[in-house]
Image (cartoon, grey):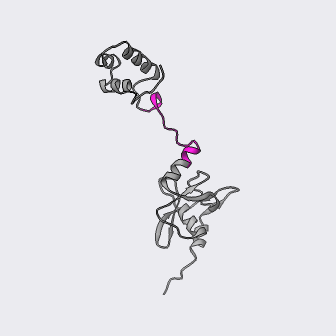
Amino acid sequence: MARIKTDPSINFFKHVHKTDDCWLWAGCEHPSGYGKFRLNMQHLPAHRASYILHYGEFDRGLLVCHKCDTPLCVNPDHLFLGTQKDNMQDMINKGRKIKPIGEDMPNAKLTNRKVMQIKQMIQMNFRQKDIADIFTIDPSTISRIKSGLRWRLPL
């Protein structure tokens, strides 16, 4: 017996919970937090499938990005096409990508205060090896601080 092919959008919308703003995917979910949907024999992120169902096929080299920053949202009004660079710029513009620096880095061995002390010792002509021994860090770190490659704090 032949299998009747149903409209993929019917199956798609079985997994969509519409709120006042976002349309949240309630079907299968990828560990990354994005929904998953099988469209035309391909497993796709649900938001990508939503874009195709609403707007049609597009250049597969492009990303489907979220205006709302909600990974499970499949509302076509919240989706836009962009390059990886566009997506990263969108993330930065929205303040979601704040790269920790200095003592805020999870593996930082120095504090801003210690770096200020190191810079003062460099200006007083202490040997880099001696400074490294005092702070129990690698001498190359002292060299990078001195050259401005690391810890660019004003004195």
Residue occupying the point 42% across, 16% down = 117
Span colored in magenta: 90-106
Residue occupying the point 51% across, 49% down = 88
- 76 vs 137, left or right, is right
Q: Is residue 98 magenta?
A: yes
Q: Is residue 145 magenta?
A: no
Q: Is residue 95 above or below residue 31?
A: above
Q: Is residue 104 above or below residue 56?
A: above
- 10 vs 133, left or right, is right
Name, please, the residue furthest toward the bottom: 1
Q: Position of residue 7 (x, y in %)?
A: 58, 76
Name, please, the residue furthest toward the right: 20
- 55 vs 40, left or right, is right
Task: Write down the quadrant of residue 139 in the picture.
Answer: top left
Q: Position of residue 33 (x, y in %)?
A: 51, 53
Q: Position of residue 150 (x, y in %)?
A: 40, 29
Name, please, the residue furthest toward the top: 124
Residue occupying the point 56% across, 78% down = 6
Task: From the viewer's side, name the closer residue of 41 and 78.
Answer: 78
Task: From the viewer's side, name the closer residue of 49 and 97.
Answer: 97
Task: Write down the quadrant of residue 24 in the picture.
Answer: bottom right
Task: From the viewer's side, name the closer residue of 30 and 155.
Answer: 155
Residue occupying the point 58% across, 68% down = 12
